[in-house]
Image: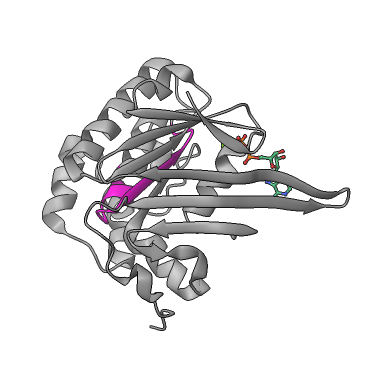
Amino acid sequence: MSIHPTPQHLEAAPKAAPILRVEGLRKSYSTPQGAIPVLRGVDFTLAAGASLALTGESGSGKSTLLHLVGALDDADSGVIILDGVEVTLLSEHARATIRREKIGTVFQQFNLIPSLTVAENLGFQARLAGRYDAAWQEELTHRLGLAELCARYPEELSGGQQQRVAIGRALAVRPKLLLADEPTGNLDEATGDKVMSLALDLVAATGCAFLMATHSARLAARLQRRVRLDAGVLAAR
Ligand code: ADP
Ligand code: MG
């Protein structure tokens, strides 16, 4: 495995260092009409065990920011440091490793693998990352209320059940950072609230940092901190 060397000044992160540090992040998309700037210098930090809601109008760049933090896309400039490693300097191969081992992601669309059972979906990413832990999967299964559903396939589940599986799958690797992009956007309010409660309990239990994009002020209020993306920069709110 060829991971680019970590710059020396990042090798031994101080104990109090945040799990995630984002500095001066810029991103524009090129379109036939020219470049559309979306992020114009985004800065924030997130400590282990901390939760942050990212709010903002539709189209303000929330998903773009999560994609960059999740190492799924490249920024134009700026720095992302995850667990002491400057992700923005890594090769694609090294970033894929970070993505697998340190980051769990939950999307609005659940994105379960249709041909795999609930139990197989739950363990899928952990197995890929070589981090499968049967006892932890068992605990996740019970805490997420999935014990009776293990042999079912995604198409046999409700939306709330599918999202519970997706949360378990993301946390099965014991990530340092959980990212969620409008995770309850496809659920009714009551179901979404229950799924959020389960996610927040598990985030607290694992001590991972949690960054969630949502346009709902009500959901954002359930996290420890809130920032708003407006005109390409973050404002505290
Ligand atoms: P949000 O998640 O807050 O709704 P997005 O990050 O999805 O916002 O989008 C921010 C802006 O970037 C929008 O104007 C959107 O149309 C544009 N955008 C997103 N992805 C692309 C892309 N791949 N190519 C061009 N424009 C894009
Ligand atoms: Mg979005």
Q: Is residue 148 visible?
A: no
| Depth order, front residue of 58/227 | 227
Point 20% across, 45% down: residue: 206
Please provide the residue range marked out in magenta.
168-183
- Foreground pick, 202 / 20: 20
User: 34 or 161: nearer the eye?
Assistant: 34
Q: Is residue 180 above or below residue 69?
A: above
Q: Residue 232 at x, y = what percent?
A: 64, 38
- Rendered residue at 33%/35% (across/down): 51
Q: Left or right of 73: which side holds 17? A: left
Does the magenta segment cover residue 182? yes
Q: Residue drawn at (31%, 66%), measured in percent from left and top?
A: 129
Q: Is residue 161 visible?
A: yes
For the N terminus, the quadrant is bottom left
> For residue 200, what is the image quadrant?
top left
Judge whether 112 appears above or below 102 on screen: above
Up the image or down, 21 lies above or below 187; here it is below
> Measured from the top left, where is residue 12 in percent x and y?
27, 68
